[in-house]
Image: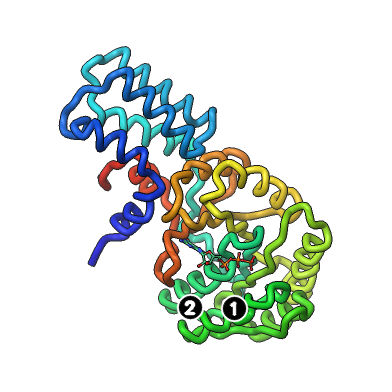
């Protein structure tokens, strides 16, 4: 069976074509070629192109440059290792703690975000993951706004044999959340899929708050997790979006989707710098198993084309 890392790396390969090109082209960098000023410049461009942002890019470049000044024989592989370790420092604390899933019954996870970011798909993938871990899961179809969303989540739930509480198109989303909580009483996890909304639409932001109030009638501390689902291919545009959602709703975590099909996977660093909340999972495809726990080490190694230590 392929290791988790190889899956993660395959998924990120498309995220990082430029990096692979840099280190691939210099091909030899890994197999012994020395670093030079031109490849450093190319790396800087690639980091900007992947939306790592000025701060992170500069930190990586400056540190590699400093090492290069001291040792003109620096190899590409050494530069990649330095880059990965700087990135790991930027992302320090971005990984959730092992016991992040508390002991409430149910633990309520609310997924929110803009239209099309991948909430419904992620709700299903997440439900499947918990089920695979032997947990009792209920899904709440609170995206009553988009007509097709109900059908989409029903299809997933049937396919993965997951318990789903849903209603009709345009039903009160908070009422669905209330019913779903009741159905999930004494179960392990309730995952609430919500309608996509722009952070600028105040009525939809109010709907989110209503869902929260209704859940809190059952359990004052619910939702225990409010995660923003961010489309990783939006690059740095997603940073402002994430900040606004955080201000309005108080996020506790992030899921970054679509990292399999983008060359802008660097925005993760920018979002984390801005919000400082953990990244729980990354989406690397459309299949049920394509949701992987985020780990700083795997992400940094994959970005810089390093193998797992
Ligand atoms: N390649 C890829 N596609 C994904 C990923 N996650 C979701 N998608 C796709 O993105 C599209 C939108 O996903 P949805 O789950 O419908 O998004 P949503 O946030 O629920 O959308 P709204 O209900 O409109 O807010 C679908 O075609 C998904 O299959 C991912 O990690 N990788």
The vertical placement of 249 against 270, above or below, is below
Looking at the rendered image, the quarter that the N terminus falls into is: bottom left
Mark 1 lies on a secondary structure that is strand
Whether residue 123 sits left or right of residue 285 in the image: it is: right
Whether residue 217 sits left or right of residue 64 in the image: it is: right
Residue 304 on image: x %, y %: 34, 39
Q: Residues within 10 Å of mark 1 (few under 14, many from 20)?
A: many
Residue 110 on image: x %, y %: 64, 66
| Residue that carries the numbered disc 2 in the rendered image | 135
Direction left: furthest residue: 31
Q: Nearer the viewer, residue 134 or 270?
A: 270
Q: Nearer the viewer, residue 290 or 116?
A: 116
- The residue sitting at 47% across, 36% down in the picture is 49
Mark 2 lies on a secondary structure that is loop
Mark-to-mark CA distance, 1 and 2: 13 Å
- The residue sitting at 16% across, 33% down in the picture is 31
Q: Which mark is residue 226?
A: none
Mark 1 vs mark 2, foreground winner is: 1
Looking at the rendered image, the quarter that the C terminus falls into is: top left
> How many callouts does the rendering have?
2
- The residue sitting at 68% across, 80% down in the picture is 181
Label 1 residue near ligand 1, CB within 8 Å: no
- The residue sitting at 37% across, 45% down in the picture is 297
Q: Nearer the viewer, residue 103 or 90?
A: 90
Q: Which mark is residue 139?
A: 1
Quadrant of the image where one finds ligand 1: bottom right
Residue 138's quadrant in the figure?
Answer: bottom right
Residue 198 on image: x %, y %: 72, 56
Residue 301 on image: x %, y %: 33, 43
């Amino acid at each position: 069976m392929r290791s988790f890392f190889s899956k993660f790396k395959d998924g990120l390969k498309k995220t990082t074509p430029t990096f692979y090109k840099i280190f691939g082209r210099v091909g030899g960098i890994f197999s012994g070629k020395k670093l030079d000023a031109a490849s450093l410049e190319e790396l800087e461009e690639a980091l900007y192109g992947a939306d790592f942002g000025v701060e992170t890019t500069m930190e990586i470049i400056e540190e590699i440059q400093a090492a290069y000044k001291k040792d003109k024989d620096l190899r590409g592989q050494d530069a990649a290792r330095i880059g990965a370790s700087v990135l790991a420092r930027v992302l320090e604390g971005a990984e959730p703690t092992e016991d992040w899933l508390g002991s409430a019954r149910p633990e309520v996870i609310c997924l929110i975000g803009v239209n099309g970011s991948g909430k419904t798909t992620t709700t299903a993938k997440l439900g499947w993951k918990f089920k695979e871990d032997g947990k009792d899961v209920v899904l709440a179809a609170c995206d009553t706004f988009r007509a097709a969303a109900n059908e989409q989540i029903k299809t997933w739930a049937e396919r993965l044999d997951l318990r789903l509480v849903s209603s009709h198109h345009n039903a009160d989303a908070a009422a669905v959340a209330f019913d779903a909580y009741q159905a999930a009483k004494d179960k392990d996890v309730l995952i609430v899929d919500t309608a996509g909304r722009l952070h600028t639409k105040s009525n939809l932001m109010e709907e989110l708050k209503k869902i929260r109030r209704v859940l809190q009638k059952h359990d004052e501390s619910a939702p225990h997790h409010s995660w923003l689902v961010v489309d990783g291919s939006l690059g740095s545009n997603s940073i402002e979006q994430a900040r606004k959602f955080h201000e309005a709703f108080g996020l506790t975590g992030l899921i970054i989707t679509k990292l399999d099909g983008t060359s802008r996977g660097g925005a993760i660093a920018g979002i984390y710098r801005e919000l400082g909340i953990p990244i729980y999972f990354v989406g690397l495809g459309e299949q049920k198993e394509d949701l992987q726990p985020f780990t700083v080490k795997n992400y940094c190694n994959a970005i810089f084309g390093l193998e797992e230590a």
